[in-house]
Amino acid sequence: MGLGLGRGEPASERIPESARLVVPVMAAGGGSGRSTVACLLADALARLGDTVVADLSARLCSPWPAWTAGAQGGGLGALPPDRPLSRAEIRDAAAVRPAAEGRWSVLTDGREWSAAPLPLPADPAAWYQLAAAGGWQVLVADTAHPVAHDVTAADWAGLPGLTRGWCALPYAVPVLCAQPTAGGVHRLQQAVEVLRHCEGMPLQRTVVAFSAASDGRLPAVARAAATMLAPHTAAVVHLPHDADIRTHGLAARPSRIRGRTAGAARGLAAAVLATAREAFGDPLPTAPRPMPAPPPSPSPAV
């Protein structure tokens, strides 16, 4: 696939109930529009399957808690880490957002700023298991780690790293975000170069999303980058600037988002789904069931 301008539509059929799609939304650095891309992508993917966004950022660094303030759901702080959780408990902890067609959920830490920091699990498999236990078919992960640094540091340390961990989940299609500016394109190209030269990184299964912060055409530097990236990635999609998102952030109502922005988000969802089907099969195969959490060990008698 080459440069897409968001005119595509996802396939009308829904993801099979037994299948699962994992979409880690990642970036080379901050200011890439990663959370906005995750929000728009979840809104589009909600048409195809039961969708949840997992917010992996620390509470005071994330835009999601402010959006979910006062919304339904107890948040991640309501999920005890020391015992197995029921599907109802997990789903009750999620805030719910209406979509253009249906709705989707958000798992974030929505407690007050003064609460003690919540130790979020680093292992991507833990988030996969949480989403699977909650019964969601589509997991969109708003990650917080810088991709190039994570991959390089992990290789030097002889560890898998977070990027590899997310890409190895069944059935994962990474989305790599960047601003279409000179600085954003430079960081994106650096990240792609790292992924190309590190063993086992699924660059051909990665969708690139340019998220514009201003109106107008895609700048020449971004168009040139898209042409260079097309042979090495699954797709390159342009998400245009949207005044309502610029003003209201994640609280922007789906009904007020521009039609071309919503169309671009559907094009991004179509690229993700087409990539998943090409890589894993059409229809998507039945997802493996995560291992249940072991019961707590009995305390020794005193």
Image (cartoon, grey):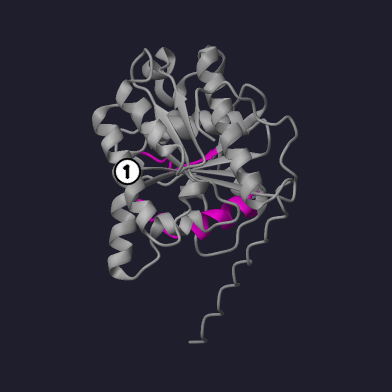
Q: Nearer the viewer, residue 245 or 160?
A: 160
Q: Which residues are magenta?
A: 106-134
Q: How many marks?
A: 1
Q: Quadrant of residue 216?
A: top left
Residue drawn at 35 percent across, 49 percent down: 147
| Residue 256 visible (yes or no) | yes
Q: Amino acid at mark 1?
A: Ala
* Position above or below: 98 against 45: above
**Residue projecting furthest to the left:** 183
Residue 170 position, x and y percent, is: 60, 56
| Residue 118 visible (yes or no) | no
Image quadrant occupied by the N terminus: top right
Q: Nearer the viewer, residue 98 or 112?
A: 98
Residue drawn at 65 percent across, 52 percent down: 280
Q: Quadrant of residue 36?
A: top left
Residue drawn at 57 percent across, 14 percent down: 255
Compared across the picture, whether 293 is left or right of 38 comes to right
Compared across the picture, whether 130 is left or right of 17 comes to left
Residue 33 position, x and y percent, is: 37, 31
Q: Per the image, is 117 magenta?
A: yes
Q: Per the image, is 181 magenta?
A: no
Residue 140 position, x and y percent, is: 53, 42
Residue 180 position, x and y percent, is: 33, 27
